[in-house]
Amino acid sequence: MFSLFAACALIGCGALVGCALVTTISVLGRFFLNAPIQGDIEIVALLMSVGISLVLPYCQIKRGNVVVDIFTQGAPPKMRIALDLLGCLTIALLGAILAWRMGLGGVELRSSVDQTMVLRLPTWIVFPIIVPSMALLALAGLLGAWQEWRLINGKRGA
């Protein structure tokens, strides 16, 4: 299962590298040749949405999110674990809500034939990637909550 999270993250990183390349080529083309990539902002926006959504589940499963623990540093371990469990459940809920609502939004965009301004790309084309990514984020939250639950109950491992 972990390889699925890692594979998505690698694809997401590829999309983000694509954003950097499109931006760099467009800026250099504009500066040296007075010929930027047409629709570069649209391409970057679509790639960025895909890239970020694909990396989020891996970040959650690896516990790579920023944690502000200034108020809980001195708390008992069980309380910190309980707060981590609550955080994981919150991520799971948000991932599920985002998958649901973005799924509906993608269907609506497809039926309304919405397009980008310059390249006329259909805006719904990223939703078949983003929606499963959000569902995977929800799963990552549930897996994290399960690990925290086991820690509260004195069990180690997954």
Image: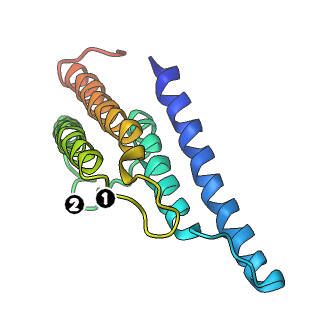
Q: Position of residue 147 (x, y in %)?
A: 29, 23
Question: Can you say whether 79 is above or below 155 in the image?
Answer: below
Determine which of the numbered discs, if any, sits on residue 71 in the image: 2
| Horizontal side, residue 72 vs residue 156: left or right | left
Cα distance, mark 2 to mark 1? 8 Å
Name the amino acid, label 2: Phe
Q: How crowded is mark 2: few (under 14 residues within 10 Å), some or many (20 or more)?
A: few
Q: State the scheme by which the image is colored.
A: rainbow
Question: Which amino acid does the dot numbered 1 rest on?
Answer: Val
- In this rendered view, identify the residue nearer to me: 138 or 34: 34
Residue closest to the eye, 152 or 125: 125
Q: Where residue 60 sits in the image (x, y, percent)? A: 38, 39
Q: Which of 19 and 30 is in front in this view?
A: 30
User: x and y percent of residue 41 in the render?
Assistant: 53, 69
Residue 31 x/y as whole percent: 77, 85
Question: Which residue is nearer to you in this view: 7 or 152?
Answer: 7
Quadrant where the C terminus lies? Answer: top left
Which residue bears the numbered disc 1? 68
Element at label 1: loop
Asked where in the image residue 54 lies, by quadrant, the reply is top left
Local crowd at mark 1 within 10 Å, few (<14), some, or many (≥20)? few
Name the residue: 18% across, 42% down.
104
Q: Do the residues labelled 2 and 1 touch (CB within 8 Å)?
A: yes
Q: What residue lies at 24% left-to-right and 52% top-to-bottom?
A: 112
Q: Would you place residue 129 above or below residue 149 in this image?
A: below
